[in-house]
Image (cartoon, rainbow, N blue to C red):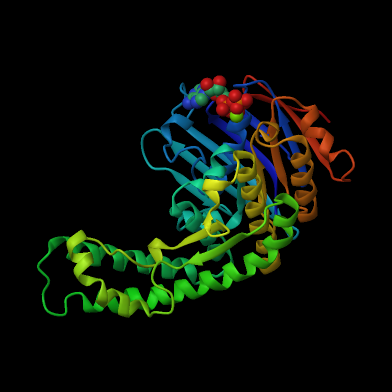
Amino acid sequence: MALSRLSVSNLRNLAHVDIQPSPAVNLIYGENGSGKTSLLESINVLALGRSFRSHKIKPLINESAPALTVFGKVSHSGTEIPLGVHRPRIGDSQFKALGAPVESLAELASYLPLQVINADAFGLLVGSPKLRRQYLDWLVFHVEHEFYALWRAAQRCLKHRNSILRRGRIGEGELTPWNLELASCTEKIDSLRSECFERLLLVLEPLLKEFMAVDGLKLSLYRGWEKGRAYQEILQETLPRDLKQGFTGSGFHRADIKIRINGQSAADILSRGQQKLLVCALKLAQGQLFEQLTGRRCVYLVDDLPAELDEKHRYLLVKWLNILRTQVFITGVEVDPLISPWSDQNQEVKVFHVEHGEITSED
Ligand SMILES: Nc1ncnc2c1ncn2[C@@H]1O[C@H](COP(=O)(O)OP(=O)(O)OP(=O)(O)O)[C@@H](O)[C@H]1O
Ligand SMILES: [Mg+2]
């Protein structure tokens, strides 16, 4: 799975860019404000319809243009999948794959699985449970085809149940159908998540050994309600509390990956640098398991690598990216710290220089 062509119009300061990336390693360097992160954002827009920096579209569109367009070709097993995203300031956006509009952004996301390692990615450890839930669900989504429909059905039930709870007065049996469907979807979501999580732990172990010399680090899945209990039972039991609060307090929407060191939250103990390394290991494990389970590889976007990791760990990250044999796009201000870890990795490396929104290939 690799982007073989990327064409961008009017995304931030990138007026017109058209490149043919290497299927392996793409190193992008340039001064502050030249457009490196914007280039990575354009790949994110192609894959997911939006940036990794924010959900807002307007700031992404070049200030003097009415719309942004990103077009790309994804090559996979000898075929090429054209993808296109057009997002105007005013009016409807268009998302296309294989020349036809996609049915949903979830469909678009399935064509170009991405992993982003940037300063925000480190929030995975210290941020809200939602981020860790999204991390696990990314895998489950790409690996288990029934997951997305189940997740949507569960969200719908939750919304209805919460609106009844907020209203307060509940008619006899009014909650029953929502409880039943929510419980059925929730138990299935939980078993898909648990299965994926167990596999993830196996892949993560060797990575953690190399990236983190920390004893007692343990990851566990909190499924969103009490261990060993059926969710249906919990819904009955917590009804008085839910009614008081006006929302459903337990469930799949409360799941989290607990990361602890000898029983204490890892976020409270690890240094900032160690947190980054742990997040790198988590992202690499995700890509590795994704490949094991689907035979496909995801594309890695690594923004400002030298700013995030010291030299030793840059080499380590590169070593593992190399093992994964995925396509990578890595940015940095200086070219040397970007190139040197790849010099003996026997990969097809392309170097791009970005200057005032213009990109030139240096090969
Ligand atoms: N909507 C927009 N229209 C035009 N230019 C924009 C828009 N949004 C941002 N910019 C400009 O685009 C430029 C590129 O920003 P980008 O974040 O890609 O830079 P960068 O090369 O990653 O820099 P750094 O090394 O500081 O991270 C910046 O100068 C920024 O001010
Ligand atoms: Mg940047």
Give how far across and how far down residue 322 sits, in percent: 80, 50
Q: Is residue 39 left or right of residue 225?
A: right
- As drawn, 298 above or below 89: below
Is residue 326 visible to the viewer in this orientation of the structure?
no
For the N terminus, the quadrant is: bottom right
Q: Residue at x 72, y 51 (%)?
A: 213
For the C terminus, the quadrant is: top right
Q: Residue at x 35, y 64 (%)?
A: 155
- As drawn, 362 above or below 183: above
Give how far across and how far down residue 98 sits, in percent: 59, 54
Q: Residue at x 60, y 70 (%)?
A: 198
Question: Quick one: 17 or 341, which is closer to the camera?
Answer: 341
Question: Quick one: 264 or 133, which is closer to the camera?
Answer: 264
Give how far across and how far down residue 328 sits, in percent: 71, 44
Is residue 360 visible to the viewer in this orientation of the structure?
yes
Total numbered labels placed on residues in the image = 0
In which quadrant of the rendered view does residue 173 lie?
Answer: bottom left
Give how far across and how far down residue 141 sits, in percent: 53, 63
- As drawn, 252 above or below 208: below
Question: Quick one: 147 or 217, which is closer to the camera?
Answer: 217
- In the rendered image, the residue lying farthest to the front is 262
Q: Residue at x 78, y 53 (%)?
A: 325
The image quadrant in which ligand 1 is located: top right
- As drawn, 106 above or below 336: below
Q: Is residue 8 left or right of residue 313?
A: left
